[in-house]
Image: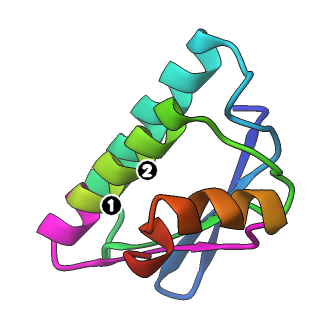
Amino acid sequence: MDHLRVEQRGSLRVVHFVVEYGSCNWVKLKETEEFLLRLAEEVTPPCLLLDFTNTDYFGSEFISVLLRCYKRINQRQGRFSLCGAQSDLLQELETTRLNELW
């Protein structure tokens, strides 16, 4: 996928996002959802870091994708984290109190 870059750092799988997920098209959102949920089930050990350094915004649909991904990793007693959230993105996470979860 041209809007994601994945790398392995030791036991941690890092997914770098290079687009915004609020106004992106539905097809790209569904592709990303399927990819992240599959990765959450398959990555061993279950340690996943999502890097939003290049993303300023994501919409409510994408927040639900993040929640489902978190639940799958959590069911496997893994670790799910976000990093690189810019000010607007961080404010969205704080408003929804998801910054306390991740």
For disc 2, the marked residue is: 66
Given residues 8 and 92, the one toward you in this image is 92
| Quadrant housing the N terminus | top right
Taking the magenta stretch, the answer to whether it contains residue 28 is no
Q: CA distance from mark 2 to mark 1?
A: 6 Å
> Label 1: few (<14), some or many (≥20) within 10 Å?
many
Determine the residue positioned at 17% across, 79% down.
77
- Disc number placed over residue 2 in the picture, else none: none
Q: Residue 70's image quarter?
A: bottom left
The image position of residue 31, as x and y in percent, is: 53, 24
Residue 42 in view, yes or no: no
Residue 74 in view, yes or no: yes
> Given contact means CB atoms under 8 Å apart, are the residues at marks 2 and 1 in contact?
yes
For disc 1, the marked residue is: 70
Q: Secondary structure at mark 2?
A: helix
| Quadrant housing the C terminus | bottom left
What's drawn in magenta, residue-wise? 72-86
